[in-house]
């Protein structure tokens, strides 16, 4: 059924404005045998509490919206307790995966069923994971997503070098490049917003996204 759903979406709703996404939902739950339940952040309540978390893969194309897939996030404590997993009906093959890894696996499954995304989007829980961003880049997938304000980096790629540690020496090459002397230091996104002309010179304007239970999202 899952594969058929995705194949129908690929054949009937293909287009240049097909947008995919990654998101998760926390649902308050109790009970020792509720699969994946533990104290963790629950977005439904906005606090830490007993809940389960599921990762979702939605798609939209104009007026068409569909949930392609959902997978349970299995915490490490659950994954290491196979007796508890069996009591809760969790298959032996199911193990802990980071949420960003689940997101990429959902993406690969959808692509395997013929879906193509012009863009994908996500919130800062995924945008702050460099392995996740790198996975999208490796898949040649354009994306626009949130990143944490604390994320550090550069607006423009700085010059780097892979020279040995000693000039003219025979030391082993560096495992990762280093910044060339005099290169700018990385700054947090918050600092870039305050100091970088790439941001401050833009004609920003407020945009009303939607109304929420906590008021308008602007």
Image (cartoon, rainbow, N blue to C red):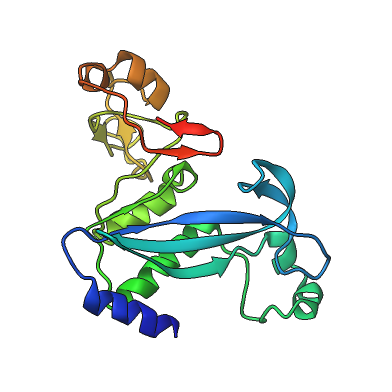
Residue 30 sits in quarter: bottom right
Of 98 and 169, which appears nearest the observer?
Answer: 98
Image spot of residue 44 (x, y percent): 63, 48
Q: Nearer the viewer, residue 158 or 134?
A: 134
Side of 189 where 11 appears, left or right = left
Q: Give the residue at the far right of this rendering.
A: 32
Nearest to the observer: residue 187 or residue 39 = 39
Going by the image, does 17 lie left or right of 83? left
Q: Residue at x 43, y 63 (%)?
A: 57
Which residue is rendered at x = 83% and y = 64% of the image?
31
Q: Residue 188, how many percent across, how many down? A: 41, 25
Q: Quadrant of residue 217?
A: top left
Q: Between residues 84 and 31, which one lies in front from this camera angle? A: 31
| Residue drawn at 31 percent across, 60 percent down | 60
Residue furthest left in the image? 16
* Above-or-below relation of 30 to 131: below
Image quarter in which the C terminus is found: top left
Q: Is residue 165 visible?
A: yes
Res 113 visible? no
Quadrant where the N terminus sits is bottom left
């Amino acid at each position: 059924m899952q594969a058929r759903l995705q194949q129908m979406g690929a054949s009937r709703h293909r287009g240049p404005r097909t947008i995919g996404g990654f998101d998760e939902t926390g649902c308050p739950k109790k009970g020792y045998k509720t699969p994946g339940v533990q104290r963790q952040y629950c977005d439904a309540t906005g606090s830490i509490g007993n809940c389960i978390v599921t990762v979702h893969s939605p798609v939209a194309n104009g007026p068409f919206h569909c949930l392609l897939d959902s997978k349970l996030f299995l915490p490490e404590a659950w994954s290491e307790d196979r007796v508890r997993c069996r009591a809760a009906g969790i298959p032996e093959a199911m193990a802990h995966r980071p949420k960003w890894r689940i997101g990429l696996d959902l993406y690969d499954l959808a692509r395997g069923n013929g879906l193509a995304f012009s863009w994908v989007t996500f919130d800062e829980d995924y945008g702050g994971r460099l392995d996740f961003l790198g996975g999208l880049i490796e898949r040649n997938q354009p994306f626009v997503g949130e990143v944490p304000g604390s994320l550090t980096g550069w607006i423009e790629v700085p010059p780097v070098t892979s020279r040995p540690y000693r000039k003219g020496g025979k030391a082993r090459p560096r495992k990762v490049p280093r910044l060339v002397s005099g290169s700018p230091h990385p700054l947090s996104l918050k600092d870039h917003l305050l100091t970088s002309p790439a941001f401050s010179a833009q004609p920003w304007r407020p945009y009303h996204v939607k109304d929420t239970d906590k008021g308008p999202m602007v």
